[in-house]
Image (spheres, rainbow, N blue to C red):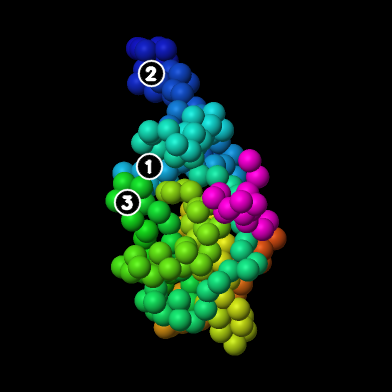
Amino acid sequence: MSTLGGSPLASLRRITSTRPAPVVGERCEMCAAPIVEEHQHVVNLESRVLMCTCRGCYLLFTAEHAELRYRSVPDRYLSFPGFDFGAREWDELQIPVGLAFLFKNSVQDRIIAFYPGPAGATESELPLDAWDRIVAANAQLDHLRADVEALLLRGADREHPDYTAHIVPIDACYELVGRLRSLWRGFDGGTEARAAIDDFFAMVEQRSRPAPPAPESPMAPS
């Protein structure tokens, strides 16, 4: 008669007792180190994928002008109190809804516009001459960092009479789009989606500071 030590049950116990503990919580997608829920992101410039990272990996890709495949997403929020933008400029962008975010894609060397909807983020073919006119009237937009920041635009309506613009982290835009996708109802998004947009812009306003003078401006600090 076999002893317990040589039985299949004993073998199973030995295997399970020496098995590594299961991974609990999120992990850095670069080094697999544990990360907290509120973590930072790195963008893969070729695939446009956002990667969740630990602080150490995040800091490896913060050099703005280095030739890197990845870029760290900064956490700054900028506002433009004197933004020269109105209904005509909005129409020129050919965006069918009252919310959009634009960013510079360094790989494709062009400006790309996205707007939210029931299917997520929809890409818009942005007329480059329209963008050039907006930048010419608002030189502070030169502060926009390629790939990792977006110009967030909100159109005017009865509840929000002014057109607004902010520079925000690109991951914040994708987070908003994901939330709106789960809430969107009907053509205009519905009550819950509009409330989520209002909450998001309240957060952006709270975190934003006025954009500094344009880099080439004589008023810009040396």
Q: Position of residue 141 (x, y in %)?
A: 52, 58
Sooner in the amino-acid sequence: mark 1 or mark 2:
2
Residue 37 in sight here: no
In the image, the segment drawn in magenta is 209-222
Queried whether the magenta region covers residue 216, the answer comes back as yes
Using the rendered view, name the quadrant where residue 16 is placed.
Answer: top left
The local secondary structure at tag 1 comes to strand
User: Please, what is the dominant secondary structure of the magenta stretch?
Assistant: loop
Q: Are marks 1 and 2 in contact (CB under 8 Å)?
A: no
Q: Are marks 3 and 2 in contact (CB under 8 Å)?
A: no
Residue beneath the point at 61% across and 51% down: 218
Q: Position of residue 206 (x, y in %)?
A: 70, 60
Give the residue type at disc 1: Asn
Q: In the rendered image, which residue does mark 2 sit on?
A: 11
Sooner in the amino-acid sequence: mark 3 or mark 2:
2
Q: In the rendered image, which residue does mark 3 sit on?
A: 109
